[in-house]
C-alpha cells in the first residue's frame, strides 16, 4: 500500500532548555517523516518576546543534532517554506488576520489591559470562569476602522461560534465534541502586530504544508479554537495528534522544578543538555523516551533507524507515562554495550580530557573491554578508569589495610607482591597471576586480602576493573612504583 510522504514539524519556543517532552515530540515527528519518505521541519515559535531566552534557540538545534534528529528544513538550513522563525513572518500573520476580519471570523478589540483585568476579577468574584465578555465583538466596522485610523491600540480576536457544537477529530482519541457556548474569543494578533500561538501555528502549518501536527496534550484545551481557525480559512485539516503527558516518577502530577532539582542531585535530569553532560547517550535517551507513549514492549531495545522501521502513529497511546529513571539507566547501559570499541573510545575520551587527563588512545582502546560492562553512563568511565591515565595514584591509607590485618602485616604483603612482580620479565596477566596465587596459598592468607591490597596500591581504589588485566595496561614500571608508594604509606601508619 502506498503511504503518502508526511511533512511533520517540531515547533518549540526558545523560552528555556530543550526538555524530554519536547525531544520525544521531535522524535515521533522525525520517525513518521522518515518512515513515509517525507520531511521533518524545525520551526522556532519565538513570538513571546518577553519569555525568549538568549541562546535557547541554539540549544534546541544543538540538542536535536546530538539526539540524531537532523531536520530537513529549519532556521539554519533553510528550505522553500521559510522563514522558519515566527518573528520573521510577521507580515504573513497580519495578512491572514486581515482575511479573517474581512470574512467576519475575527474582529478588532480595543479593550485595555486594565479593563480586561477588572472584567476578569469581577467574573472570578462571581465564581465564573474568566472569559472575554464580547464588548468589541459587535462593534460597527466603520467605528472600528475610525478607531484604528486614530492609532488607538487594538488586538484582533477570533470570533468563536456561540451556538451548537464543535466536533474535532483527534487521531488518538477520536472525535472530541465541545459545546460552543463554552468557547472564548481569544486574541490571535497582539497590539505589537505579532500573532499568538493560536493564529501563527495554524497559518504556519498550512503554509508549510504540514500533514501531521504532533504536540503535547496541554493543547487539547485550545483544540476547538484551532480547528475553528483552520475551518474559517477553508483549509484542509492536518491529522492532529496530542501526545501523552509525562508524570513525575511517583506517577502523580507533572514534573515540577522541585522534582527536577531532586533528580539532578541523583544524577538525572529531564533537560537534554544536562543528560548529555551527565553521560547519557542519545541512543539511550531516545530509546527510553520513545517507549513512554508508544505501545510497544517496554524493554524493546532499538536504535533510531530500527524505530523508523517499526513506527506507526496508530501505535501511539494517549495514556500518561510516569518517568522512570531506572529504565533510562537500563537503556543507556544496554546501548553502551552495543557500541563498537572504536565508537565507545571516541565517546569516552572527552570525559577523561575534561578531567585534565592526558589520554593515550592505545591505552583507551585496551581498557574499553575491561570497563564496558560496568558503565551505566559514559561519565562512569572516570570512576572505573581514570587511574589508567594518571602518573601516580593516592590511595586512602585505610583502604590499604586488608580486612583482619594491621598496617604492618599489610605492608609485608605489599612488599612480597612487589618482589614477585619485580622478578617477572613482564607484567602480563598470564605471567603474574599464577605466582601471586601461589603466594596466597602458601601464606595462608585469602585472595581478597592479598589482591585487595594490590588493587588499592595499583589503581588507588577499592573497586576497579579486573586486577591483572588492569595492571597489564598500566604497565610494569608504573605498577611497581605505585606498589612501592603504598608500602611507604603503610610503613608510616
Image: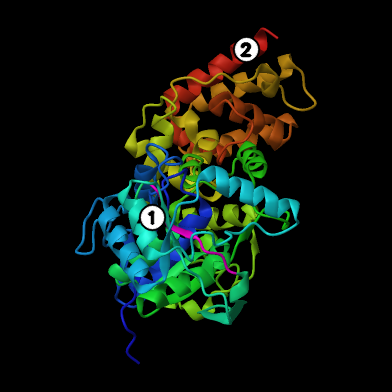
Image point 58% across, 66% down: which residue? 221
Crowding around mark 2 (Cα neighbors within 10 Å: few <14, some 14 to 19, many 20+) is some
Residue 185: in magenta span: yes
Do tag 1 and tag 2 residues touch (Cβ < 8 Å)?
Answer: no
**Magenta stretch?**
183-191
Image point 64% across, 51% down: which residue? 120
Res 61 seen here: yes
- Element at label 2: helix
Spatial CA span between label 1 and label 2: 71 Å
Residue 20 — which label? none
Magenta region's main secondary structure?
Answer: loop
Extreme residue in the bottom direction? 1
Circle nearer the N terminus (1, 2): 1
In the figure, 412 relative to 242: above or below? above
* Mark 1 or mark 2, whichever is nearer to me: 1
Residue 380: in magenta span: no
Residue 243, picture quadrant: bottom right
- Element at label 1: loop
> In which quadrant will I find the C terminus?
top right
Image point 37% across, 38% down: which residue? 55
In the figure, 475 relative to 116: above or below? above
What is the x, y in percent for residue 169? 52, 81
What residue is pinned by disc 1?
Answer: 195
What is the x, y in percent for residue 371? 51, 44
What residue is pinned by disc 2?
Answer: 489
Q: Is residue 58 left or right of residue 227?
A: left
Extreme residue in the left direction? 80
Extreme residue in the top direction? 492
Amino acid at each position: 500500500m502506498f503511504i503518502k510522504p508526511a511533512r511533520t514539524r517540531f515547533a518549540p519556543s526558545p523560552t528555556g532548555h530543550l526538555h524530554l517532552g519536547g525531544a520525544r515530540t521531535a522524535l515521533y515527528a522525525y520517525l513518521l517523516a522518515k518512515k513515509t519518505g517525507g520531511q521533518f521541519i524545525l520551526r522556532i515559535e519565538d513570538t513571546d518576546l518577553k519569555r525568549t531566552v538568549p541562546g535557547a534557540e541554539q540549544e534546541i538545534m544543538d540538542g536535536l543534532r546530538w539526539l540524531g534528529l537532523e531536520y530537513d528544513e529549519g532556521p539554519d538550513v533553510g528550505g522553500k517554506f521559510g522563514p522558519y522563525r515566527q518573528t520573521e513572518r510577521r507580515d504573513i500573520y497580519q495578512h491572514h488576520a486581515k482575511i479573517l476580519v474581512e470574512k467576519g471570523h475575527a474582529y478588532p478589540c480595543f479593550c485595555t489591559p486594565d479593563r480586561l483585568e477588572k472584567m476578569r476579577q469581577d467574573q472570578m468574584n462571581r465564581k465564573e470562569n474568566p472569559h472575554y465578555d464580547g464588548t468589541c465583538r459587535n462593534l460597527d466596522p466603520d467605528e472600528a476602522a475610525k478607531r484604528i485610523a486614530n492609532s488607538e491600540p487594538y488586538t484582533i480576536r477570533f470570533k468563536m461560534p456561540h451556538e451548537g457544537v464543535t466536533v474535532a477529530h483527534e487521531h488518538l482519541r477520536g472525535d472530541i465534541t465541545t459545546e460552543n457556548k463554552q468557547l472564548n474569543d481569544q486574541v490571535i494578533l497582539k497590539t505589537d502586530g505579532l500573532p499568538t500561538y493560536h493564529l501563527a501555528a495554524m497559518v504556519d502549518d498550512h503554509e508549510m504544508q504540514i500533514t501531521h501536527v504532533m504536540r503535547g496534550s496541554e493543547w487539547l484545551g485550545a483544540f476547538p479554537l484551532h480547528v475553528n481557525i483552520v475551518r474559517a480559512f477553508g483549509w484542509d485539516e492536518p491529522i492532529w495528534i496530542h501526545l501523552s503527558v509525562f508524570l513525575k516518577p511517583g506517577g502523580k502530577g507533572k514534573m515540577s522544578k522541585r522534582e527536577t532539582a531532586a533528580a539532578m542531585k541523583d544524577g538525572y535530569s529531564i533537560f537534554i543538555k544536562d543528560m548529555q553532560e551527565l553521560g547519557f547517550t542519545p541512543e539511550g535517551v531516545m530509546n527510553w523516551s520513545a517507549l513512554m507513549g508508544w505501545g510497544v514492549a517496554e524493554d524493546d531495545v532499538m536504535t533510531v533507524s530500527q524505530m523508523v522501521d517499526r513506527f506507526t502513529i496508530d501505535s501511539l497511546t494517549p495514556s500518561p507515562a510516569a518517568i522512570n529513571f531506572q529504565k533510562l539507566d537500563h537503556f543507556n547501559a544496554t546501548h553502551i554495550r552495543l557500541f563498537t570499541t572504536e565508537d565507545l573510545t571516541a565517546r569516552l575520551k572527552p570525559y577523561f580530557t575534561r578531567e585534565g587527563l592526558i589520554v593515550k588512545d592505545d591505552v583507551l582502546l585496551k581498557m574499553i573491554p575491561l570497563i564496558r560492562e560496568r558503565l551505566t553512563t559514559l561519565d562512569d568511565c572516570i570512576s572505573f578508569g581514570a587511574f589508567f591515565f594518571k602518573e601516580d595514584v593516592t590511595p586512602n591509607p585505610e583502604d590499604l589495610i586488608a580486612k583482619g590485618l594491621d598496617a604492618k602485616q599489610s605492608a609485608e604483603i605489599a612488599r612480597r607482591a612487589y618482589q614477585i612482580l619485580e622478578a617477572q620479565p613482564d607484567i602480563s596477566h598470564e605471567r603474574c597471576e599464577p605466582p601471586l596465587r601461589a603466594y596466597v596459598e602458601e601464606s595462608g592468607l585469602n585472595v581478597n586480602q592479598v589482591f585487595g591490597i594490590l588493587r588499592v596500591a595499583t589503581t588507588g581504589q577499592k573497586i576497579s576493573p579486573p586486577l591483572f588485566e588492569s595492571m597489564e595496561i598500566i604497565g610494569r614500571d608504573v605498577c611497581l612504583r605505585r606498589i612501592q608508594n603504598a608500602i611507604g604509606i603503610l610503613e608510616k601508619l
